[in-house]
Amino acid sequence: MAEYQITTIDGGITQISVSGTVASNDIELFRALSHLSKKFSCTLVNLLELSDTSEDLFDYLDEISSRTRIKIIVKKPELVNKCTEKGLQTFPTIKSASLSYAGEETLRLLISRLRDVPILNTEAYRLIQHSASPDANFAELERMMQNNSGLCSQILRTANSPYFMRSSKAETLQQAMVTLGLAPLRQIFIYNFYNSVGNFFGSQQETVEHGQECAKLAEFIAKAGSASYHECAKVRLIGLLHDVGRQALAFFFPQQYERVRHLIKVEKKPSFLAELVVFGIEHQSIGSILANRWNFPDYLSKVIGDHHYLQAKDWNTLTLPVFCANNFLNKRDGEPFSLFFQKLEGYFFLKKAELPWKNIDDEFNDFLEKSEDF
Ligand SMILES: [Fe+2]
Ligand SMILES: [Fe+2]
């Protein structure tokens, strides 16, 4: 028969540690697991000291996982495999399991707090939703924004810009929308929505300015790589929004975020690692989840989610300019950063273009100094 011990670890999570050998008729252990699954929303099951077990243990864990989130701490490969077969989450250490729990809790809290905020009632948000729906149409969009003169003139201005080369001036909103098409319209709505989010998230001037500079510089890089107008527009939007998850974390959890800032400034931890330590989740994942929830186009949530790790190679033509711009700015601002020169070379290689700059730091600084306000 196995032995077990139930403890509460840091963060108030319940852990059951099982040692020895689990037999198929280990009623007492199974009863204890059942009790925990009814009482707690998450349970850590520590199998690090387990010598052997009957298959029944995994069947039983699988069964109770419908009532409670089970996180299994296990290292032995054969036990890890058994858990994976049942779709049970495994972690090599207590620390990693409890961080995963903290990350889920952060996300749950953030999403429930987000429900109470007025940003989702904004006109721009409704426009994004309509333009993403299968029955999107220009007449409805026109009706929705008829009282928003700022947005209407922005759309007219864009449609009449040299890029769209209309033979005659677009004079009505409908003509302008037809010229632009839905995808660029959606980008305009997202810019407007982000402005309201920015206002709502309050005075995080530093992150907002960082996003604006990143947008300009990432677009500058993409243009130098002869990216198309549409690609440049996407890169600019990603640059602006890439740290939206950081804004959300700092807004909803201001005290914990001070700890993150301390880890960044004093211990020189990159922002996403500092966030993992404090929240169990980083701003890229939060940003990507928010972008999905807000119904942003796919590329935005994908690239926001990948802007530090660069794992999704398919998105490289969009991610690399943002990665390079972001890390250049972090380096300039004395924050921890990743080396980006090779990635910059990689981007120009992908675009089959010549890297046009000799001294990157000087050229980028020069561009940012001369560039217009966002
Ligand atoms: Fe970031
Ligand atoms: Fe950033």
Image (cartoon, helix red, strand yellow):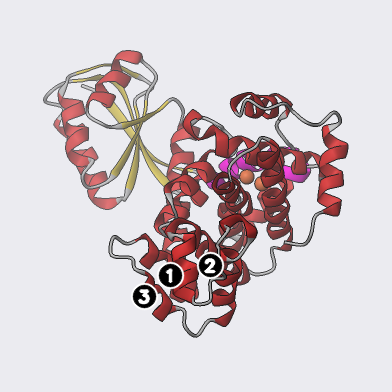
The circle drawn on residue 127 is 1
> Label 3 crowding class (10 Å Cα cut-off): few <14, some 14-19, many 20+?
few
In this rendering, position of residue 21 left or right of residue 48? left
In this rendering, position of residue 85 left or right of residue 317? left
Q: Position of residue 7 (x, y in %)?
A: 40, 40
Q: Is residue 49 above or below residue 132?
A: above
- N-terminal of the two: label 1 or label 3? 1
The circle drawn on residue 193 is 2
Q: Position of residue 28 (x, y in %)?
A: 18, 34
Quarter of the figure with residue 212: bottom right
What is the distance, in whole Å, between disc 1 and disc 3 at their CAs?
Answer: 12 Å
> Label 1 crowding class (10 Å Cα cut-off): few <14, some 14-19, many 20+?
many
Read off the magenta span.
Answer: 264-284
> Label 2 crowding class (10 Å Cα cut-off): few <14, some 14-19, many 20+?
many
**Eye-nearest disc, 2 or 1:** 1
SS at circle 2: helix
| Residue projecting furthest to the bottom | 147
Residue at left offset 87%, top offset 45%: 366
Q: Amino acid at mark 1?
A: Leu
